[in-house]
């Protein structure tokens, strides 16, 4: 399995991420699409397939987008939206750790 180093990842791979200040409907659509793609990556990983560089870059780009969106002072996010974005961020972080540090096979 290839090891991934912290490298520059292009912003162009964010799934339909709205730019700038957006309304909650756009973020709901973004979260749904990003969650679906993340679940696809998780399924591949669970089947023992390697996560390719593009998927890894996509995950890291989502993290950047989520952090930027939550930290944007001009963006008014409700508690539920912040919670949903944080949940997506944690799911990405969890999968990233599984990929980086796979568990040894069960005996």
Image: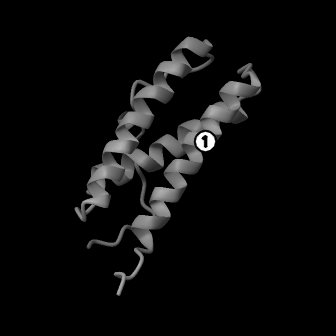
Which residue lies most toward the front here?
A: 107
> Which residue shows up at 25% across the image and 65% down it?
48
Where, quadrant-wise, is the C terminus in this rendering?
Answer: bottom left
Q: Badge 1 local density, few (<14 within 10 Å), some, or many (20+)?
A: some
Q: Quadrant of residue 39?
A: top left
* Residue under label 1: 87
Location of residue 48 with respect to 81 vertically, above or below:
below
Q: Viewed as shown, does residue 87 lie left or right of 18?
A: right
Res. 19 in view: no
Location of residue 12 with respect to 29 vertically, above or below:
below
Q: Position of residue 90 (x, y in %)?
A: 59, 50
* Front position in the image: 50 or 11: 50
* Front position in the image: 47 or 74: 47
Q: Position of residue 69 (x, y in %)?
A: 63, 31
Res. 11 in view: yes
Location of residue 77 with respect to 53 vertically, above or below:
above
Q: Quadrant of residue 89?
A: top right
> Which residue shows up at 37% across the image and 50% down it?
57
* Front position in the image: 87 or 5: 87
Q: Viewed as shown, does residue 65 lie left or right of 16?
A: right
Q: Position of residue 52 (x, y in %)?
A: 26, 57
> Which residue shows up at 71% across the image and 21% down it?
75
Location of residue 61 with respect to 75 vertically, above or below:
below
Q: Position of residue 71 (x, y in %)?
A: 72, 35
Q: Quadrant of residue 3?
A: bottom left
Q: Viewed as shown, does residue 62 lie left or right of 107?
A: right
């Amino acid at each position: 399995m290839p090891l991934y180093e912290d490298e520059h990842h292009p912003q162009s791979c964010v799934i339909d991420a709205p730019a700038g200040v957006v309304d909650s409907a756009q973020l709901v659509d973004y979260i749904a699409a990003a969650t679906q793609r993340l679940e696809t990556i998780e399924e591949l990983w669970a089947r023992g397939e390697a996560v390719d560089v593009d998927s890894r870059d996509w995950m890291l780009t989502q993290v950047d987008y989520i952090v930027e969106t939550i930290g944007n002072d001009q963006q008014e996010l409700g508690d539920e939206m912040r919670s949903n974005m944080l949940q997506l961020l944690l799911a990405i972080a969890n999968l990233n750790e599984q990929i980086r540090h796979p568990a040894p096979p069960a005996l």
